[in-house]
Image (tube, grey):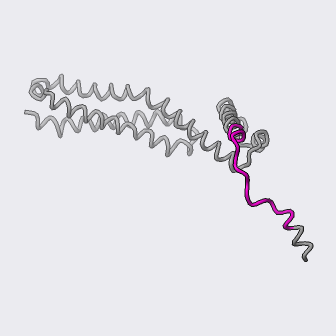
Amino acid sequence: MERELGRILVQRPALHRRAPTDESWTRHFRDTRRMDKQDSQRSPGSPAAGSADARKATGQSEASSITVSAAGSSRKGLRDAARFWEPRRLLYNLALFGVVLDWVTKTWPHFRPAMTLESLGIMMVLALLANLCYCAGYLTEILIQNSTSSWNRQRWAVWVVGTLLAILFENYWIADEIYPFVR
């Protein structure tokens, strides 16, 4: 019995680990960058970078590999989201500006007295709120991005539907909240 207990104590791994050195951190980040680069260069049908071979090559455990790949994929996901949504923000703003321009030109005699510096400030606040609502696209991106494989195609549908809803809301706001109160 004592002999068995002694063998167990000898085989037991150390409970403490030494503090990481600068060299180990450098190696870790270099391996992480290499894995991110490999992920971005892989074709859709190739094996994932988190595979056992990739972990073995970099000397990482499965848990640290999952953490690294999750951080890399979330960074990549946010970068992809910004590349999609931000260039279209200009189109969104132009569409909304076109609606305002249409309302003002078609009903110019009615809106002429309302064109003051005070109303310009109010319109700027409304434009900022419209851009804040545009950021809802990022929320859909976060919620849906990893759940479907055809998200790229669905992004366009979300953008078109969101822009059309913004135009509808803007028309309602102008017709019901602004137009009747302009004197």
Q: Residue furthest right?
A: 3
Task: Give left or right: position of 139 versus 21.
Answer: left
Task: Let me know if residue 148 is in the magenta part.
Answer: no
Q: Residue furthest left?
A: 183
Tell me where residue 15 appears, x and y as whole percent. 75, 61
Of 175 and 57, the residue lying toward us: 57
Tell me where residue 111 appears, x and y as whole percent. 12, 27
Task: Give left or right: position of 73 versus 95.
Answer: right
Viewport quadrant of the C terminus:
top left
Q: Residue at x 64, y 47 (%)?
A: 67
Of 152 and 73, the residue lying toward us: 73
Task: Let me know if residue 14 is in the magenta part.
Answer: yes
Q: Residue at x 23, y 38 (%)?
A: 172
Viewport quadrant of the N terminus:
bottom right
Task: Give left or right: position of 35 versus 6.
Answer: left
Q: Image height check: is 5 above or below 60?
A: below
Tell me where residue 122 appears, x and y as whole percent. 20, 34
Numbered circles on residues, count? 0
Span highlighted in magenta in the image: 8-27
Q: Residue at x 78, y 59 (%)?
A: 14
